[in-house]
Amino acid sequence: MSTPEQYVSVRYLVDDVHAAVDFYTAHLGFHLKTSAAPAFADVVRGPLRLLLSGPASSGARATPNDATSPGRNRIHLIVDDLDTEIDRLRDAGLAFRSELVSGPGGRQILLADPAGNLIELFQPAGEATPASI
């Protein structure tokens, strides 16, 4: 079954749907698609539809009790200028969960949403590189 809008959907369990929507829309370029807060909302960035399921949502209720904490998985957002994004997010008062890591494929840093779900900001190698490298 296909629809005109095709998204890749990822579900994150969150403690506070309003706080999660605010985080993703204010800081990471998502826009609100639908809201049934406080139970559920979904936000979209390009082809990614992020399902934000609060404790009262059916998605959260279907999750086994031993799998309710945030995991090591994360969404991966490509950015053009990682240093600028880091500065912008720090200026907004956000704290990062990792140091900046560089590898052959590019550079990355992790931050967490209000519920502790990880977000990887990634700048591919060969894109705009900082003067310090």
Image (tube, rainbow, N blue to C red):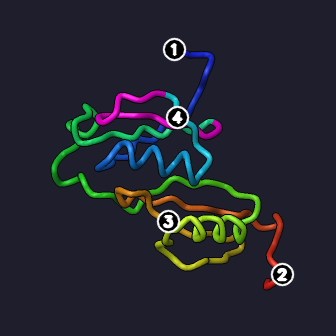
Q: Secondary structure at mark 3?
A: strand
Q: What is the C-alpha distance between the residues marked 4 and 3?
A: 20 Å
| C-alpha distance separating marks 4 and 2 | 36 Å
| Residue type beneath disc 3 | Leu
Say what amino acid the circle numbered 1 marks.
Answer: Met
The mark closer to the camera, 4 or 2, is 4
Query: Residue shown at 70%/57% (left/top)?
Result: 79
Check the image and name the residue furthest to the front.
92
Q: Nearer the viewer, mark 1 or mark 3?
A: 3
First of labels 2, 3 by sequence position: 3
Image position, residue 110 (x, y; %): 52, 67
The part of the chain drawn in magenta is 34-46
Q: Amino acid at mark 4?
A: Leu
Q: Bin the neighbour count of mark 2 within 10 Å (Cα to Cα): few under 14, some 14-19, many 20 and up.
A: few
**Which mark, by number, is residue 32?**
4
Residue located 52% across and 34% down the image = 32
Q: Earlier in the sequence, mark 4 or mark 2?
A: 4
Main SS of residues in magenta: strand
Q: Which mark is residue 111?
A: 3
Q: Label 3 crowding class (10 Å Cα cut-off): few <14, some 14-19, many 20+?
A: many
Kindly identify the residue that appears in the image at 39 percent across and 49 percent down: 19
Left or right of residue 91, residue 70 in this image: left
Q: Considering only order in the chain, which callout, 2 or 1, is on the residue closer to the N terminus?
A: 1
Which one is in front in this view, the residue at disc 1 or the one at disc 2? Answer: 2
